[in-house]
Amino acid sequence: MKLDTINSRILHSLVLAGVLFGLLITSLTWFELRGKNDIMGNAFNKRLIAEEEEVLRGRIVDRKGEVLAETLPSENSKIRNYPEKRLYAHIIGYNSAVYGKTLLEAKYNSELIGKSNLEFFQQIQKMLSEETPKGYDLRLTISHALQVVAREQLGDRHGAVVALDPKTGEILAMVSTPDFNPNASKLEENWKTLIENENSPLLPRATMGLYPPGSIFKVITAAAAIEAGKGDYTTEDLGTTVIDGMTFSNAGEKAHGDVDLHKALTVSSNVYFAELSQKIGASALIDKAKDAGITKSFEFDLPRTDSRIGDKSMGKTELAATGIGQGKLLVSPLQMAMVAAGIANNGTIMQPYLVKSVEKEEGSLLRTTDAKSLYDMVSAETAAELKAMMVSVVEEGTGTRAQISGVQVAGKTGTAQNEKSTESDSKDHAWFIGFAPAEDPQIAVAVLLEYRGEGGGRAAAPVAAKVMSAWLKLSESE
Amino acid sequence: MGMKAKTGTSLYTHFWGPLHLVALTILVLFGQLTLMGSPIDFIPLIMGASLLLLIYFVGWVIRFNRLGDPYLWTIVAMLISLGQAMQYRLSPVNGVKQFNWILIGVLVYLMVYVLYATLHGRFRSVFFHYGLLIALFAITLIFGTEINGARNWLKLGGHTFQPSELGKIVFVFFMAACVTTPERLRVKWSGREIDPKFVMMGLVYVLMGFFAIQREFGTAMLIFGVYLTFIYVFERDILFTVYNLGLVSVLGFVAFKTVSHIEVRVDTWLDPWIDIGGTGYQITQSLFAIGSGGFFGSGLGMGYPKFIPAVRTDFIFAAICEELGILGGIAVIMLFFILLYRGMKLALRIEDRYMKAVAFGLTMTIGYQTFIIIGGVIKLIPLTGITLPFLSYGGSSMVSSFATLGLLQALSGQILRKEAAQLETGYNQ
């Protein structure tokens, strides 16, 4: 063999080595940026415990400073105490030597133990000082008082309530039930039943639960119609309509007569919206749902699940089903609260967030979260039209139980069929989304009661009314 | 004479600069180790000072005697400084022992340089090296001691020694002899002559089998990688390389299906989280360490690398990532890559095929070894326990790494002298 050939093949080997080493570097970098995110909270990561032994883990407080989680200094063992017990199980999560860390305790672990890279020199200072160093505190956007109201309203029912400030995206209350007591001793005592319980008390329904939306989705169908120039569609509602051989009927097959978009949303006419969706077309409807954030992912303080919708090749009957919030649609309560907030905020959905600021001991801020817009869902004009319709829903339509005296409320009810619904035994989910006051929205909510077999107007609307009016009173005194 | 001086100057012009950089690294790392102790620990101070003296002294020896490529030592000086600081931080007692191994390693490095220059022509025999390899196996199997479930250690005096560390180097010489003097491998079987490359192939597969029997899957993988690149570079027929790759894939798959601990290793690699308390423990602890370090690391002495089993040997890279960040880890990878580059550059310049093959094989050995262990520790490939050259704790590894370096240095010294002589002749004409 010629020496030149050998030499060029040696060069190939060097290139191969370069590729292999490049793979090492790429893989390390990927691991650091993405791969490690889900594993660092694992209970087998003994660093989490070791690091905590040297610091006093920071507190987690509500927007007014109410303590929601704290670590009490003690000689031999430091115990993470959750004074509100179950109330924040699906926001704060738990911090257990045995089962690891979840939710905010996991996501903000380095802040809570004071290991933020920003504060390098202060860390050195801390190391040199004698006393036990303290981690940073988290101040949440949650209002403890409102959280209590929301939890009381759910009672022993399973479901979720999400309330947020439509102008900033601050989450004011977020409750999922069933829940569990995250205090270490209780967690260890109940662990086996918690993981085996068929009601999944460990599942944060507000952020990770996916449900068919039912009629609350009609606000998105309406938005798609208005922006596609089909907002002037009218029909005679006889209680049922047949699309491509399949019958779609109103609740109780009630006939509403001549209906336009405004009337149809107010009375929640399935006939109208099933027909309307044919005019809009699958493509425009799905695009509008995506504008509202369905199927999209975004950065959030807690793990969350993306909402789902069918694809653009859907047939006529599936399109009609999607238009009334059934079909392959699956949404999370957080997602639908964001939709309500977007309409309240003139068509712009703000990025939702839970942690208002990370604070040092003396109340000085390490960093704060800024409000920023996330999606432009609809134009301001469309938002105004939707708002007017949603006001009618509460004033004279299906959502009258969401009324608050002296305040104009906008909303939409939903009663969603699901895999457990049968003709003899309705297990429908009850939904309500809305905001108040309609003219200057301070709060937007989504309420879900799963497998209740009750209508959204009957069961979910009163919960929303209580939560919204409680916040309006609280924010007056704030 | 003038030309010779010119060649010399250009090669060594930037010699001291990078070495000062190594010195700075030593000052920072060992300074921190000294101040970290309470009360202040003077051992790292002495150790750092000795290391400084050592790198400048060896540097001066290379510079003054013109012992070939000046950067080989600079790169390795950086690696051993990082490794030594980490070893002392992980265990002061073993850190001191490791320092002795570095001193012995450097001695071996210089000795190999001197010896190779006088002996290199004498041992170009295929069967001498193969015999040596088989003898190493035989001795290990008969007199070997078992450590961590693998019977691949020899006790010599008070020390244990891993013969496979020497085996890797001998294997390179064997391969170099095979590809440059294939006529020695001519075998007649039932009247027909067998192509020498198939004889070579048979011999190599037998060796791989031996390593597999001793459960040294890392070393088996390593020599197979070296063998494969050897036949790619030195056999005209590229298909031969492809066939080998295919054959070993089949063999590997059969081994995966039949040998249970290979299956366990692969399963652990695919999903270590299933049995995190058992087979997956080591690799997940390594991932926690790398993840907790982030880009910049916790700082020397401020992480928890001791949570990883075998952190001083196989998992030293994870410890570096935890405390010096993945940027520190990437620096280590880059250092190995420039070492590789220098070795390849050397192999390209050598005209004698046998010596070319030796330089190439030794360089690839370092390259593959680095890839196999770092890749294993970061879960890019299944984990096999081999050492990271110049960084892992242990005498066998340190000595064999320095012996490899000594050989490369000797080959580059020869090239340098030869080229200088040629230039001088050219000038005189």
Image (cartoon, rainbow, N blue to C red):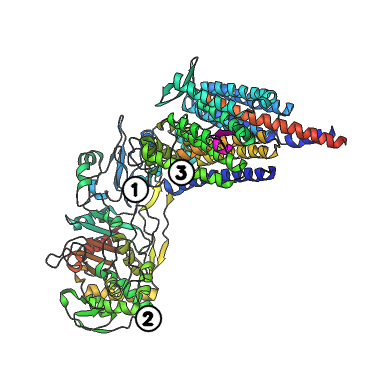
Can the viewer see residue A121? Answer: no
Q: Which of A282 and B38 is in front in this view?
A: A282
- Tell me if A218 is positioned left or right of B236 in this view: left
Chain for mark 2? Answer: A
Q: Residue A136 in the image: x percent, y percent? A: 39, 43
| Residue named by callout 3 | B249
User: In x, y percent, where is residue B2?
Assistant: 84, 34
- Do badges 2 and 3 share one subunit? no
The residue stretch that appears in magenta: B186-199
Residue B178: x and y in percent read: 60, 34
Which quadrant of the structure image shows residue A14?
top right
- View extreme (left): residue: A424
How far apart are the alpha carbons under marks 3 and 1?
46 Å
Assess disc 3: are there few (<14), some (14-19) or many (≥20) residues with their C-alpha within 10 Å of its C-alpha: few
Q: Mark 1 points at which residue?
A: A104
**Marks 1/2: CA distance?**
44 Å
B285 over A330 or under it: above or below: above
A220 sits left or right of B359 in the view: left
Marks 1, 2: nearer the viewer: 2
* Amino acid type at mark 2: Gly
Residue A172 forms part of the magenta stretch: no
Amino acid carrying label 1: it is: Leu
Give yes or no for contact between labels 2 and 3 (Cβ–Cβ under 8 Å): no
**Left or right of B428, for residue B13:** left
> Toward which corner of the image does residue B74 lie, by quadrant?
top right
Q: Quadrant of the C terminus of chain B?
A: top right
Dot 3 falls on a residue whose secondary structure is helix
The residue that disc 2 covers is A229
Residue sitting at x 76%, y 37%: B10
Q: Is residue A310 above or below residue B427?
A: below
Answer whether residue B198 is magenta in the image.
Answer: yes
